[in-house]
Amino acid sequence: MIRGMDASLPLRVAFDHVCAPGGWLSPGVLEIDGTGMITDVRSLRTDSMDARVEVRPGFALPALPNVHSHAFQRAMAGHAEHRSPGHASDSFWTWREAMYDVAASMNPEALESLAALLFVEMLESGSTAVAEFHYLHHEPGGIAATPATAYSDAILRAATRVGIGVTLCPVLYLHGGFDKTLEPRQLRFGHRDVAAFVDLWHELDAKVEEVPHARLAIAFHSLRAVRPDEMHRCLDALGLARTGDTTPVHIHVAEQPLEVDDCLRATGKRPVELLLDENLVDARTCLVHATHLSDNEIIRAAATGAIAGLCPTTEANLGDGLFALSPWLDAGGAIGIGSDSQISVDPLEELRLLEYGQRLVHGQRCVAAQSDTLHVGDLLWTRAALGGARAIGQDVAELAPGQRADFIVLDGSHPRLHSHGVATIRDAAIFSRSRRSVVRETWRAGERLVANGRHRESDAVLTDWASIHT
Ligand SMILES: [Zn+2]
């Protein structure tokens, strides 16, 4: 286990303000046991029990889980912002060509150093846990890696090194499109059949057991890459088909209009409609993007408890379109946020852009606000923490007994925050921004991994990355 900068477990730690499920505690105390789980959250008592507890400055809040990451794509951030030669316009599909080139260049060593750098960026920006949607399984051409789990091992080593709680989502990827075989460049993502993938999953299950704060989930790349009958067979074979199972199941859906049209042509149904009709959407499902949904799909999918995995900066970068946030929230839909292509690694920026996209299109302000939560920052933060924790299958939804002690501390002395109290602190953290981060500390399982905005491994990780990625 990674040791904290100053934490020795179990511990009692107090802050000027602690965001508890029932409201702010000012000052508040967190009791954390030897395994990093919260055993009590309460207002500071003036009796002997808390008399010697130092009250630290700042606002302690639940961290924001990152529900969708492709670590290797960190290597191409900023490298795909030019018009492709010979193309009159660019799109998701031309970007995908560049992504395939980057994927082709990856080896386990490069991936590990890149993932460590990326996970430090996540911890420093306010995420303590991430779902890694991992489809880089093999060497180029589909040749088996040595060992077969080499690329997943690289992700797990990077997560262990820097202390992020990783939910590894190995991806089943069987086809190159509706009724298409895998293209040569997709072979390193693919599997021969469901059985081969099931073997890999079982191997990973044993490995993840050994990694602190990690868990194994599953992902289907998309309906382009996996048919519903293959999803059912896979879940059956893994023993994950039973009602009540809570293993997260992630899938890219309806990111691009062309994908919806292709699905309609091939199956007669829209992607989410098809998944719903096949009983493949429930409360453990993370519908990544879910950008192009009909009104009926929104009502039906939201009612299942499925989480919409939203990645606003990537969706903007790729020209995907705009998620129907208000109808989804009005239908009781759950949300989580992700950094996806890693062009930005900052959950506060994802939340800001999520709201701003709506304002630009609808000509209104405070679009995400609901009648019971009028502050946009409060609503987005709370929903992204609750939905995000469920999407990644880790107990990090709120600062409450039985949850892991994962939280961030906002710097109350930051010029952007100093005039704010608990009523507007989340609004300010999201919507009042300057170059310097407002995230002063990040704690994972009761251990402080980030202090003064810097992860303790940040210099070493950067040096290692720079020595490999020249
Ligand atoms: Zn993705």
Image: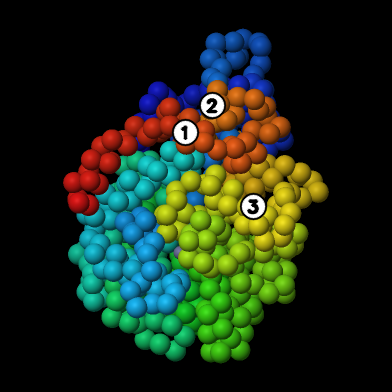
Asked which secondary structure carries label 1, the reply is loop
In percent of width and height, residue 425 lies at: 64, 33
How dense is the environment of label 2, judged by Cα within 10 Å: few (below 14), some, or many (20 and up)?
some
Q: Is mark 3 within 8 Å of ligand 1?
A: no
In percent of width and height, residue 210 lies at: 34, 49
In this rendering, position of residue 199 left or right of residue 142: right
In this rendering, position of residue 287 left or right of residue 346: right
Residue 52 versus residue 318: which sits nearer the camera? 318
In percent of width and height, residue 151 lies at: 28, 60
Q: How much space separates mark 3 and mark 2, taking CA atoms?
A: 23 Å
Q: Is mark 2 within 8 Å of ligand 1?
A: no
Asked which secondary structure carries label 3, the reply is helix
Query: What type is the residue that disc 3 sits on?
Result: Glu
Q: Which residue is mark 2?
A: 414
- Location of the N terminus by quadrant is top left
Callouts 1 and 3 close, C-beta under 8 Å: no
In this rendering, position of residue 130 left or right of residue 263: left
In the drawing, what numbered circle is on residue 328? none
Q: Which residue is mark 3?
A: 355
Asked which secondary structure carries label 2, the reply is loop
Query: What type is the residue that disc 1 sits on?
Result: Arg
- Applied colour scheme: rainbow
In percent of width and height, residue 131 lies at: 46, 55
Q: Which residue is mark 1?
A: 436
Q: Quadrant of ligand 1?
A: bottom left
| Quarter of the figure with residue 361 | bottom right
